[in-house]
Amino acid sequence: MPYKNCKIYSDGSNYIAIPSENFSHGKKPSKSPRKEQPHKAEFETAYQASQALPKKERKAFMKEQLKDCFNTEKETNEFIEKQTERKKTNAIKRRVRLFRKVHLQEWNFFVTFTYDGKIMNENEFKKKLMNTLKHLVSRKQWKYIGVWERSPEKQRLHFHGIFYIPEMIGELKAVTDYDTVSHRKQTTYQNTHFLKHFGRNDFKFLMPYDIDRSVRYILKYIEKSGERLCCGGKLPTYFISSILDDDVLCPYGVADKKLLLFDDFTCIDDDGVVMGKASPEVIKQMPKCN
């Protein structure tokens, strides 16, 4: 087999394989505890606060917040540049990893849950909603990727996410109301179970071409607020397949360490069994990894 047990991911348009010789094998050595970098905590606080400002004002704001941590202005500037670059690099890595996970799954709903103070307080809302979703993941095989967010004006708490829901609980009922943003009537679908126990919710059917836009919508809130992603269900980054020479379109990536594949490449499992041409049904049967 020319390329045995490759890690394969989708970038949304193409399948890309990483041959086994180009990724590490075996158990990674345990890392010694990292020493906390001086003034990193102060930077994180200043960085988070700066996100509410226009981009042009952010570095000046951080410089003012951190000026007493260093002896000279040059040291302050160098520290801020280095830490800002670190944040950008980590954000790019998270974005790439997220899109690889997203493109390997099925998604059928974009869902918003809105906090209702008449039912419970905010802490209860977050805890109970996450617990409910946890049970739906284990019992009904739901999957989701989402983020907490507050509305700009009223600061009302929301949870936005893309979901794979193979089995719905409750019923979806069409509700027509007035959208204050677009200033027109809109029809949304609310789930009766979540409406009873949590309050307002919106379930929107996702078409394949809506998925990337929905993920960017979620990422916007992460980058704006610093919130962490909330995920549920098995969300692997890669599937494993051996690749035939004839299925390679061309080498790809830095130092040509990856392979750009034809859309109809043949999926072959670890035992050399041909599972069929690449399709959602065949890929479901292939072993997965992160």
Image (cartoon, rainbow, N blue to C red):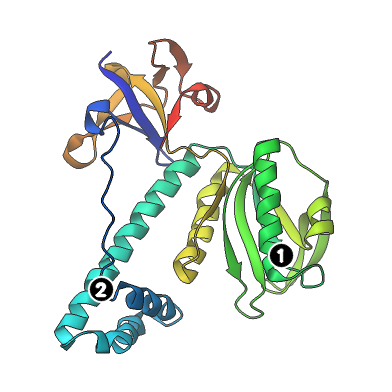
- Quadrant in which the C terminus is drawn: top left
Q: Secondary structure at mark 2?
A: loop
Residue 204 visible to the viewer: no
**Tag on residue 38?**
2
Q: Position of residue 87 (x, y in %)?
A: 32, 65
Please determine whether, in this image, residue 177 is positioned above or below residue 93: below
Q: Residues within 10 Å of mark 1 (few under 14, many from 20)?
A: few
Q: Position of residue 120 (x, y in %)?
A: 77, 68
Identify which amino acid the numbered label 1 is placed on.
Glu
- Disc 1 marks which residue? 124
Please determine whether, in this image, residue 1 is positioned above or below residue 196: above
User: What residue do we see at 36% from left, 26% from top?
Assistant: 262
Residue 189 visible to the viewer: yes
User: What residue do we see at 77% from left, 63% from top?
Assistant: 200
Viewer-proximal residue, 93 or 173? 93
Viewer-proximal residue, 257 or 229? 229
Q: Position of residue 243 (x, y in %)?
A: 33, 20
Please determine whether, in this image, residue 155 is positioned above or below residue 25: below
